[in-house]
Image: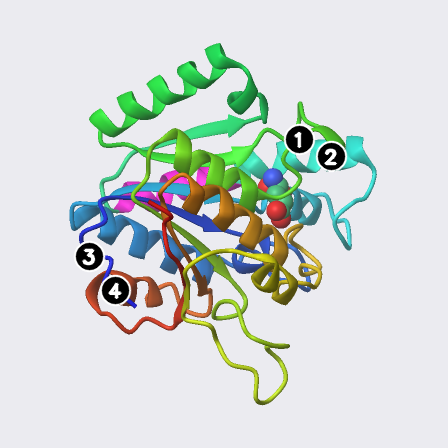
């Protein structure tokens, strides 16, 4: 495992199961605050941070008093609209404590297929980097519907990493990385390095996501494939303690899975 200290532009993706309490869907203030503190500090160390956040639907559903994330599309869209503004208010205030400015970018999949939109997003990213602002990204769940667009943010984070020509993509999740078996079973080992994502690797990644999130290990591997094929090193790391992110940049022994960039 290399030390990633020399990586400057870093995309960090955090899912609903990290940001919200599974029992209620409400924001986990302690963890989210701790995460923002680490991101702000990494930015202070000279890195350009791009933050891909989920949690809009979960937080919006909790605010509406729903016991779980709704399944019908209009309710999902409404919850995303309600939760997204909550999230941004929180992030904006937290980053502000460390004197950092944030910007909200809500993306749909046509940023890949539509050349004009793609250029517009890239130009926005570049200007935000010049202005030293932290771009905060989510899918635009209000205008997108499941079958057509980003249903989870793993793929979105890989697309974002390619659009802003990131040096590193980091996805946080509730396990330490990719295991060679069921991570909850004794004897399963963490795979620390993947040179090439092939069918063997994909078959290890089976299994559904959490109750709150929409992705799982499979969507993370697919995201890693998009990013590594674009030449971007990718890491899957545990979400237990946001301070673990420091180990990626300060040591060569972070507990995680590193997917090596292809070129
Ligand atoms: N855009 C969705 C949200 O913010 C992502 C859902 C997820 O991946 O958990 O709720």
| Label drawn at residue 149 | 1
Quick check: is 13 in the magenta stretch? Answer: no
**C-alpha gap between disc 3 and disc 2:** 37 Å
Q: Of marks 1 and 3, which one's residue comes earlier in the chain?
A: 3
Disc nearest the viewer among 1 and 4: 4
Report the residue marked by disc 2. 146
Relative to 255, 101 lies left or right: left
Q: Of marks 3 and 2, which one's residue comes earlier in the chain?
A: 3
Q: Are marks 1 and 2 in contact (CB under 8 Å)?
A: yes
> What residue lies at 42% left-to-right and 47% top-to-bottom?
228
Instruction: Identify the residue at the far right of this view.
Output: 72
212 versus 48 height, above or below: below
User: Can residue 90 be seen from the camera position used here?
Assistant: no
* Foreground pick, 38 / 150: 150
In which quarter of the view is residue 135 placed?
A: top left
**C-alpha gap between disc 4 and disc 2:** 37 Å
* Foreground pick, 166 / 95: 166
| Label drawn at residue 2 | 4
| Label drawn at residue 5 | 3
């Amino acid at each position: 495992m290399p030390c990633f200290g020399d990586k400057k532009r870093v995309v960090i993706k955090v899912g609903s199961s990290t940001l919200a309490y599974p029992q209620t869907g409400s924001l986990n203030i302690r963890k989210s605050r701790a995460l923002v503190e680490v991101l702000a500090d990494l930015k202070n160390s000279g890195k350009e941070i791009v933050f891909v956040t989920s949690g809009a639907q979960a937080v919006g559903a909790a605010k509406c008093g729903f016991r779980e994330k709704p399944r019908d599309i209009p309710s999902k869209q409404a919850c995303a609209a309600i939760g997204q503004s909550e999230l941004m208010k929180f992030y904006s205030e937290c980053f502000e404590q460390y004197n950092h400015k944030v910007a909200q970018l809500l993306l749909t999949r046509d940023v890949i297929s539509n050349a004009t939109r793609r250029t517009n997003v890239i130009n926005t990213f570049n200007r935000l980097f010049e202005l030293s602002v932290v771009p905060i990204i989510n899918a635009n769940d209000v205008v997108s519907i499941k079958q057509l667009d980003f249903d989870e943010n793993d793929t979105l984070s890989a697309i974002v990493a390619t659009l802003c020509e990131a040096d590193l993509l980091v996805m946080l999740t509730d396990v330490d990385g990719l295991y060679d078996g069921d991570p909850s079973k004794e004897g399963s080992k963490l795979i620390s390095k993947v040179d090439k994502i092939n069918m063997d690797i994909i078959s290890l990644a089976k299994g559904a996501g959490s109750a709150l999130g929409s992705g799982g290990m499979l969507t993370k591997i697919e995201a890693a494939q998009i990013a590594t094929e674009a030449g971007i090193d990718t890491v899957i790391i545990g979400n237990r303690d946001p301070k673990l992110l420091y180990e990626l940049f300060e040591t060569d022994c972070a507990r995680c899975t590193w997917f090596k960039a292809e070129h």
